[in-house]
Amino acid sequence: MMPLVDPFARAISYLRVSVTDRCDFRCSYCMSEHMTFLPKAELLSLEELDRLCTAFVRMGVQKLRITGGEPLVRKGILTFFEAMSRHLQSGALQELTLTTNGSQLAKFAEPLAALGVRRVNVSLDTLDPTKFTEITRWGRLQQVLDGISAAKAAGLRVKINAVALKGFNEDEVFSLLDWCAREDHDMTFIEVMPMGDDMGTGLRLDQYWPLKDLRARLTDRFTLTELPDRTGGPARYVRIDQTGQKLGFITPLTHNFCESCNRVRLTCTGQLYMCLGQEDMADLRSPLRASPDDAALETAIRAAIARKPKGHDFDYSRQDVRGQMTRHMSHTGG
Ligand code: SAM
Ligand code: SF4
């Protein structure tokens, strides 16, 4: 079958799939405390998610990242991982992975590892229990730390993702890094993005801490060596010479990655977003539900990829929020 290639000659080999918009946390930069979730009937069933992902794998997707919302709160999620693991076994899929808040990992780490998951990204912005509950509103730090330990014990490689938040975890940059070095976790800092509906309050603009400032702070203590690693996404990597750690920076606001973008995002309702920073999307649920045969679905996927834009429009540079997205990260899948 013809692989998926967009109009800018970028091969689409990476699909991120949000399997639910629900979550057991309410991180302040991601959701409002009284978030309304989609009616369950709107969601794709696990069988539908399987069919859709399988179509993408057939069309050349080699890496699948499961996200949400919190993917591990979706009922029956292991059934879905099990279904995807058959593509690992066949060799069609190179990697099956997930991004999680870690709250359910104590329960799921072992079965996930048994199904062929090798790596997991865990979001953790602070190691202070009080601050953790402040930022996640509903989370308990110890539960996440236990989940991370379980992941490690199950042989999963852990990467810690921390959103860099001004006035919140500025003072924890070194302690987070030290902890990751001790525990042998990789680490990535993420710039906060203008998503969701709290933007009108200016909340996230106040919280915006450019990673170039964070980097400058790191160089007070460390020598950073640029690494050539590219994943086709917005991450750039450095080696910290003093500790040997690999550290990632995700700077979606600095237009430095679109030209090599290899990914698309599927929401839990079957909408395909060709770019995280653009409103354009394609509804794949209708062709999926219209026929048990995948021909119409494949046509819809190709038509969508043919509309993948060159880049996105996020821009904080003028101190207002341009290119702001009204949808939530938990819907599109971060
Ligand atoms: N619940 C899972 C988790 O927290 O890892 C997966 C979904 S969450 C939406 C994925 C990632 O998006 C998390 O690392 C989270 O910190 C990040 N995120 C959420 N809202 C964000 C925002 N406004 N700007 C930047 N990153 C954000
Ligand atoms: Fe939930 Fe993840 Fe959003 Fe936090 S960032 S509210 S854990 S989906």
Image (cartoon, grey):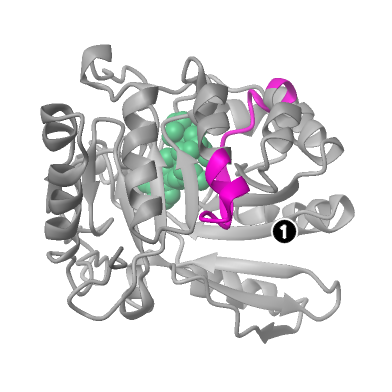
In screen coordinates, is 52 left or right of 172?
left
> In this picture, which residue range is highlighted in magenta?
86-107
* Residue 104 in the image: above or below residue 93: above
Name the residue at 31% across, 63% down.
Answer: 1
Depth check: 95 or 151 in front?
Answer: 95
The x, y position of residue 151, in whole percent, is 76, 36
Name the residue at 67% across, 33% down.
Answer: 112
Residue type at mark 1 is Asp
The x, y position of residue 78, in whole percent, is 57, 24
Which structural element holds mark 1?
Answer: strand
Residue 27 appearing in the image: no
Name the residue at 11% across, 58% down.
Answer: 303
Residue 247 appearing in the image: yes
In screen coordinates, is 54 left or right of 141?
left
* Residue 290 in the image: above or below residue 24: below
Name the residue at 32% across, 17% down.
Answer: 34
Depth check: 307 or 322 in front?
Answer: 307
Is 92 in the magenta?
A: yes
* Residue 165 in the image: above or below residue 212: above
- The image quadrant that residue 192 belongs to is bottom left
Is 211 in the magenta?
A: no
The residue carrying pointer 1 sits among few (fewer than 14), some (14 to 19) or many (20 or more) residues within 10 Å by Cα, namely some
The x, y position of residue 203, in whole percent, is 32, 43
Q: Is mark 1 within 8 Å of ligand 1?
A: no
The x, y position of residue 3, in whole percent, is 32, 67
Displayed-image quarter of ligand 1:
top left
Q: Label 1: which residue?
A: 186
